[in-house]
Image: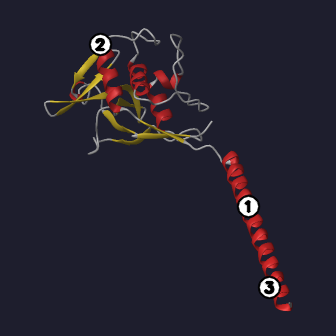
């Protein structure tokens, strides 16, 4: 009789232990699920990486090299930086709102200075900010080995001992094994760099545009 009662007590304790373990497992699972939800809700939004579409930028350059896009402001006398800005935007580079270095169009109204002025444009596109990584990742006096359609070239002359950037052109690709360029003001489509340098400008900077630009989450 005592043996039977002992077995019953052991069986009862075993059932209680299993129930407690099961309840504990359920509670732990619920707690972990809650932590995952909270972590997901509280996680900081990720930065967005945008790929620069070189083909689209060069395609836009070829399309509009000899005419003007009526959707944008334009100038008959000083339109080179405006044209290159449009090409870069066609390649996916977004307008920037950095204080003092805003680079964006305003429709058919006069755009920001960095959108239309060579020197201001070069400074704005070369700058890293809290909102985005650099658009221009390198600027060299000689054409780099890594060069392709969608990259841009600043041209100028020395004024008061310093380079003054007076013109900018965009690489449209290759023809006959040579790189060719598009530009505005004096409209040119797929012509070699020698059309400008060193015939008319003494200073040159080959500017490699970033393949990808990282934008901070909004």
Residue 20 in percent (x, y) is at 79, 69
Q: Residue at x 34, y 37 (%)?
A: 205
Residue 48 visible in rendering: yes
Return the residue at label 1: 26
Horizontal placement of 22 versus 63: left or right? right
- The mark lying in front, picked from 1 and 2, is 1
Residue 159 in percent (x, y) is at 40, 30
Alpha-carbon span between mark 1 and mark 3: 29 Å
Neighbour tally class for label 3: few under 14, some 14-19, many 20 plus, Cα within 10 Å: few
Chain-order first, disc 1 or disc 3: 3
Horizontal placement of 46 versus 200: left or right? right
Return the residue at label 2: 66
Alpha-carbon span between mark 3 and mark 2: 98 Å
Asked if labels 2 and 3 touch by Cβ distance under 8 angstroms, the answer is no
Q: Residue at x 53, y 11 (%)?
A: 109
Chain-order first, disc 3 or disc 2: 3
Instruction: Tell me the element at label 3.
Output: helix
Asked if labels 2 and 1 touch by Cβ distance under 8 angstroms, the answer is no
Q: Which numbered marker is on residue 7?
A: 3
Horizontal placement of 30 versus 212: left or right? right
Horizontal placement of 213 versus 149: left or right? right
Q: Is residue 20 above or below residue 92?
A: below
- The mark lying in front, picked from 1 and 3, is 3
Alpha-carbon span between mark 1 and mark 2: 71 Å
Neighbour tally class for label 1: few under 14, some 14-19, many 20 plus, Cα within 10 Å: few
Q: Nearer the viewer, residue 26 or 163?
A: 26
């Amino acid at each position: 009789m005592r043996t039977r009662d002992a077995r019953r007590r052991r069986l009862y304790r075993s059932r209680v232990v299993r129930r407690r373990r099961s309840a504990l497992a359920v509670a732990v699972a619920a707690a972990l699920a809650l932590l995952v939800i909270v972590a997901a809700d509280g996680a900081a939004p990720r930065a967005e990486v945008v790929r620069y579409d070189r083909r689209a930028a060069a395609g836009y350059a070829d399309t509009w090299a000899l005419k003007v896009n009526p959707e944008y402001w334009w100038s008959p006398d000083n339109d080179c930086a405006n044209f290159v800005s449009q090409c870069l935007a066609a390649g996916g580079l977004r307008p920037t709102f950095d204080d003092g270095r805003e680079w964006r169009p305003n429709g058919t109204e006069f755009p920001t200075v960095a959108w239309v002025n060579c020197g201001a444009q070069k400074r704005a596109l070369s700058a890293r900010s809290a909102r985005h990584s650099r658009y221009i990742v390198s600027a060299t006096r000689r054409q780099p080995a890594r060069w392709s359609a969608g990259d841009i070239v600043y041209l100028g002359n020395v004024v008061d001992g310093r380079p003054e950037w007076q013109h900018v052109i965009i690489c449209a690709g290759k023809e006959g094994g040579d790189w060719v360029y598009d530009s505005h003001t004096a409209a040119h489509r797929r012509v070699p760099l020698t059309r400008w340098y060193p015939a008319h400008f003494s200073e040159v900077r080959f500017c490699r545009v970033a393949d990808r630009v990282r934008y901070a989450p909004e």
